[in-house]
Image (cartoon, grey):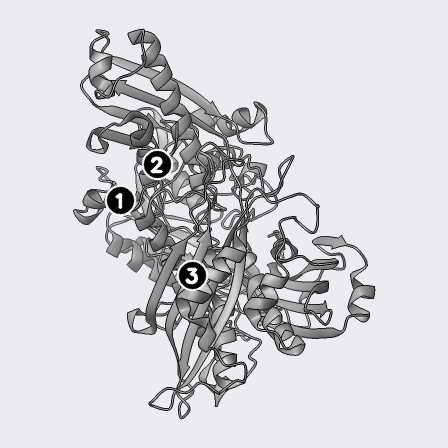
């Protein structure tokens, strides 16, 4: 069966969301609900010496005030150490008197109303014995790891660099950044139908539920993770949050449902974030601009007590045909909460550094930046030698250059001037993101009445995964989406994989299509002939059966049946980008046009053109929205966004949406998106690759390169501030 291309389709859940019927975790109407609020630590490191709860207990409506003495039985298990079950965020506050980072919960107040919980939390008095700390990786007390976290190499890069005709050696600094999805992190715990249900906006309901069960000493079957909708995740909701087990334990101890919605100012100190990082890039090329060597060294901030992998060097060597490569990633430990995945977690910072370095190399060689990238295009991975499953990056560059009218770009900075005197600059940058997949268990039911139900693995974070599932079922079975019920993000309906890493569509689409094809096959056996053009439920009704049900296990390339068993146990099992016979990535080219006021240094991004190779485009409307959102993030990262840590007290100074500066509508000009739309059937039967994360990769670098073209100023840190251009 040939896949149909969906040009444009409304979101299947749009009507429900607009009417407020799509209930998120904190919206669940639960009788007898208690409200909770935490008391954050006001020191960075040290110990709690005493807690005075008298005033808090006297607040009308306060039911119970919990301290570390109430939660000392909470365990840290392998499943609790991040959604991956690997080194990650494993530290759990409030299990002892030790404080390991500023803002961690030290007291939990539970009350009949939210107002009483807040008042009670404000009335708690805590006395500490504080200790010296390091707030940033440049501090003297920061712990520099002696061995690299990761290394990649091919050929003799040092020798090739030394003998290259053209060389650049530059360093770029990327700041600390915070996610700030609109839906705040919340946890609601309630006993329902003999099980403890945890409603939390999460990207990993199964790993989340399994981890909490282990921390609380419960059998995993006693706990159910429910996340029907997630209001933005971007990696921050990958695993167990600092308050999750506290709320669940409080509900168990009180035998009443408890809800906590974490205030945004506290999330800057308790939730994961994008860590600060430094990038040294050395590139060597011959007279024709062919890349002879790439050397890339990074240093990334990490917490003192947990681990977040440093993988900045994984993607850059895959971008172009490097003759040789040498890369290493190191971490520096400081006293903060553990950083984590944030949209294109390492790919965004590394693309900022390497794509800006490519711009500098183009200048050194005397080549156009687009031509330099085209001259170094490749169809094979320089590290493994394997071919790419598909790569249309050159087409992205050519199409984007035409759409933005790249021919008007002047090689000399400050040469293109608008009628009002603004300096005009054009910049280009490229990006890639791994093509990964996960296993899935899917149950599909077709009723003779016309109703259809599907339960499968995946989480809806606004990216449109329900649309993907509906599109595949409609394509294969011709069902009416109005009669379709999609059950995802709930361990009570199907085993749930972690939805992250841009593998959501690449996993859900093949799962839905496989189930639909199996149901079509089973229906054909029942009818005894090939299916007609009549609605499938009408053909089912003729067999005098009320429903037809199929269950399909989808195992991605490079995995076996063990992946399904891991999925059922809540252990994520991903594959890619390296497969037995090829490497798989999505590719993108961004072109930015900026205007810079000469008197004020203010930068306006007038237009961005982004062309993407993400395999088959499932829905142009949601795909375009994904890319536009990624570009907005890239503009914000280039010109606005940075977490400012107070060196005296260790906290984030701008821990709210008033001072953590993000781009607003007036900051965003035109964002034109186009797609190559070539299915990649080597990767899966749906021909899809990831889109959500690659959308951001390279966007900031395109803006930074455009600012250089406009002003002649090379700014090697983010964000670019007005004082950098005056």
SS label for mark 1:
loop
Q: Which disc, if any, is residue 67?
A: none
Closer-to-camera residue (113/593) = 593
Q: Position of residue 275 (x, y in %)?
A: 55, 62
Of the numbered discs 1 and 3, the one sitting upstream in the chain is: 1
For the residues labelled 2 and 3, the Cα–Cα distance comes to 24 Å
Labels 1 & 3 near each other (Cβ < 8 A): no
Asked if residue 657 is positioned above or below residue 381 in the image, the reply reads: below
Q: Mark 1 = which residue?
A: 9
Q: CA distance from mark 1 to mark 3?
A: 21 Å
Judged from the image, the secondary structure of the residue bearing numbered disc 2 is loop
The quadrant holding residue 560 is: top right
401 displayed left or right of 263: right
Residue 345 lies, with reference to residue 196, above or below; the image says below
Tell me whether the residue at label 2 lies in contact with that at label 1, contact meaning CB atoms closer than 8 angstroms: no
Q: Which residue is mark 2?
A: 4
Instruction: Answer with the quarter of the image where residue 38 lies.
Output: bottom left
> Looking at the image, is 268 positioned above or below residue 539?
below
| Crowd class of label 1 (few under 14; some 14 to 19; many from 20; radius 10 Å) | few
- Is residue 471 shown above or below 549? below
């Amino acid at each position: 069966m040939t896949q149909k291309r969906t040009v444009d389709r409304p979101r299947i859940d749009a009507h429900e969301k607009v009417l407020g019927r799509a209930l998120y975790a904190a919206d669940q109407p639960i009788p007898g609900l208690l409200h909770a609020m935490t008391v954050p630590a006001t020191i960075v490191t040290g110990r709690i010496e005493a807690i005075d709860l008298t005033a808090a207990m006297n607040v009308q409506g306060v039911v119970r005030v919990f301290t570390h003495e109430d939660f000392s039985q909470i365990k840290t298990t392998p499943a609790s150490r991040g959604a991956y079950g690997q080194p990650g965020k494993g530290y759990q506050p409030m299990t002892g008197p030790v404080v390991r980072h500023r803002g961690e919960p030290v007291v939990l107040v539970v009350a009949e109303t939210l107002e009483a919980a807040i008042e009670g939390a404000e009335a708690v008095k805590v006395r500490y014995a504080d200790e010296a700390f390091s707030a940033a990786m440049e501090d003297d007390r920061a712990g520099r790891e002696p061995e690299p976290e990761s290394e990649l190499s091919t050929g003799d890069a040092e020798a090739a660099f030394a003998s290259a005709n053209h060389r650049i050696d530059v360093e770029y600094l990327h700041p600390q950044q915070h996610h700030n999805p609109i839906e705040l992190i919340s946890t609601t715990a309630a006993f329902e139908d003999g099980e403890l249900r945890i409603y939390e906006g999460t990207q990993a309901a199964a790993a989340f539920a399994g981890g909490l069960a282990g921390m609380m000493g419960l059998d995993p079957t006693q706990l159910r993770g429910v996340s029907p909708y997630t209001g933005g995740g971007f990696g921050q909701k990958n695993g167990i949050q600092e308050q999750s087990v506290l709320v669940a334990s409080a509900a168990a101890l009180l035998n009443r449902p408890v809800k906590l919605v974490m205030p945004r100012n506290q999330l800057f100190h308790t939730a994961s974030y994008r860590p600060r990082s430094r990038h040294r890039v050395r590139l060597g090329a011959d007279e024709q601009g062919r890349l002879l060597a790439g050397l890339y060294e990074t240093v990334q901030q990490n917490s003192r007590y947990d681990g977040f992998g440093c993988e900045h060097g994984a993607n850059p060597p895959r971008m172009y045909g490097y003759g040789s490569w040498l890369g290493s990633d190191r971490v520096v430990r400081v006293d903060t909460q553990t950083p984590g995945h944030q949209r294109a977690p390492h790919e965004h910072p590394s693309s900022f550094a390497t794509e800006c370095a490519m711009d500098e190399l183009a200048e050194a060689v005397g080549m156009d930046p687009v031509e330099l990238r085209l001259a170094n295009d490749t169809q094979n991975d320089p590290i493994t030698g394997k071919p790419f499953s598909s790569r249309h990056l050159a087409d992205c560059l050519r199409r984007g250059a035409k759409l933005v009218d790249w021919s008007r770009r002047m090689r000399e900075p400050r040469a293109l001037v608008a009628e009002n005197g603004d300096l005009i600059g054009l910049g280009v940058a490229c990006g890639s993101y791994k093509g990964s997949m996960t296993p899935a268990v899917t149950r599909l039911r077709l009723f003779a009445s016309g109703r259809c139900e599907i339960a499968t693995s995946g989480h809806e974070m606004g990216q449109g995964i329900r649309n993907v599932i509906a599109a595949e079922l409609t394509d294969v079975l011709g069902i009416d989406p109005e009669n379709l019920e999609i059950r995802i993000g709930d361990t009570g309906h199907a085993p749930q994989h972690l939805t992250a890493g841009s593998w959501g569509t690449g996993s859900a689409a093949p799962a839905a299509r496989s189930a639909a094809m199996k149901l079509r096959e089973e229906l054909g056996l029942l009818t005894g002939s090939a299916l007609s053009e009549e609605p499938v439920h009408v053909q089912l009704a003729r067999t005098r059966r009320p429903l037809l049900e199929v269950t399909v296990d989808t195992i991605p390339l490079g995995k076996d049946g063990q992946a399904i068993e891991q999925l059922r146990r809540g252990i994520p099992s991903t594959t890619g980008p390296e497969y037995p016979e090829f490497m798989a990535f999505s590719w993108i080219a961004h072109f930015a046009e900026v205007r810079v006021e000469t008197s004020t240094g203010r930068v306006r991004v007038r237009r961005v053109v982004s062309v993407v190779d993400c395999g088959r485009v499932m829905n142009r409307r949601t795909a375009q929205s994904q890319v536009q959102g990624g570009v907005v993030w890239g503009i914000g990262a280039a010109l606005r966004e940075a977490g400012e840590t107070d060196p005296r007290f260790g906290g984030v100074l701008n821990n709210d949406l008033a001072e953590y500066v993000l781009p607003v509508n007036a900051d965003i000009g035109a964002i034109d998106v186009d797609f190559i739309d070539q299915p990649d059937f080597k990767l899966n039967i749906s021909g899809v690759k990831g889109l959500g994360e690659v959308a951001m990769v390279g966007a900031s670098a395109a803006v930074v390169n455009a600012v250089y073209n406009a002003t002649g100023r090379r700014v090697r840190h983010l964000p670019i501030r007005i004082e950098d251009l005056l």
